[in-house]
Image (cartoon, rainbow, N blue to C red):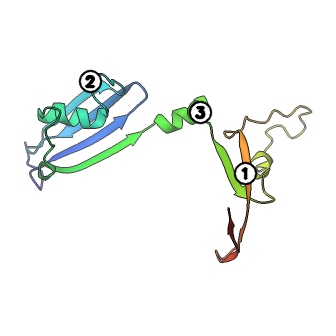
């Protein structure tokens, strides 16, 4: 096996709604695949950190030596899934006064231009708060934010 340029571990983590998958590259170049539950509050708070601990055989409570790690890259679909499934915390839209309907109006895309019944998607927010403020197209503050 080839040795990595730094002789340190590299981790790539994919945290999903059910499982967290980890690909680790050892200092000697060998790849390790590890999988664990994304949520297991009785055993750990964070699946990514726990997975690194398990791969490096470091018990909870002991620090993970940062000098042994070259890189940690993490991706997740959790937020995207929450949006698509309409799960998660309730939200409010804070927007410039006079634009409360901007997201509802959208781009007026209509797949069937002659449809008599148009079904609009449900908004992700449940309330709108309009605030007095204004910026120019160049990003200059015209009216300061008034909260």
Residue 83: x and y in percent read 58, 36
Please name the residue shown 30% across and 47% down the image.
Answer: 73
Please name the residue shown 35% across and 28% down the image.
Answer: 38
Residue 143: x and y in percent read 72, 73
Disc 3, SS: helix
Label 1 to label 3, Cα distance in Å? 24 Å
Residue 101 vertical position relative to residue 49 in the rendered view, above or below: below
Tell me which numbered mark, 1 or 3, is placed earlier along the sequence.
3
Disc 1, SS: strand
Tell me which numbered mark, 3 or 2, is placed earlier along the sequence.
2
Of tags 1 and 3, the one toward the viewer is 1
Disc 2, SS: loop
Q: Which residue is mark 1?
A: 129
Label 3 to label 2, Cα distance in Å? 29 Å
Q: Residues within 10 Å of mark 3 (few under 14, many from 20)?
A: few
Q: Quadrant of residue 109?
A: top right
- Tag of residue 84: 3
- Verify CB contact (< 8 Å) between mark 3 and mark 2: no
Q: Return the residue nearer the eye: 136 or 146.
A: 146
20 with respect to 107 (left or right) = left
Label 2 to label 1, Cα distance in Å? 41 Å
- Tag of residue 43: 2
Q: Residues within 10 Å of mark 2 (few under 14, many from 20)?
A: few
């Amino acid at each position: 096996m080839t040795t990595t340029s730094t002789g340190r571990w590299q981790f790539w983590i994919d945290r999903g709604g059910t499982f967290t998958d980890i690909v680790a590259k050892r200092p000697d170049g060998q790849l390790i695949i590890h999988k664990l539950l994304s949520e297991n509050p009785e055993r750990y708070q964070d699946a990514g950190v726990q997975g690194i601990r398990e791969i490096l055989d470091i018990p909870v409570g002991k620090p993970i030596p940062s000098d042994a790690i070259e890189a940690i890259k993490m991706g997740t679909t959790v937020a995207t899934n929450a949006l698509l499934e309409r799960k998660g915390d309730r939200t409010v839209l804070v927007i410039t006064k006079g634009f409360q309907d901007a997201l509802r109006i959208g781009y007026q895309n209509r797949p069937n231009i002659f449809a008599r019944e148009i079904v609009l998607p449900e908004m992700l927010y449940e309330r709108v708060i309009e605030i007095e403020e204004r910026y120019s197209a160049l990003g200059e503050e015209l009216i300061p934010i008034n909260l």
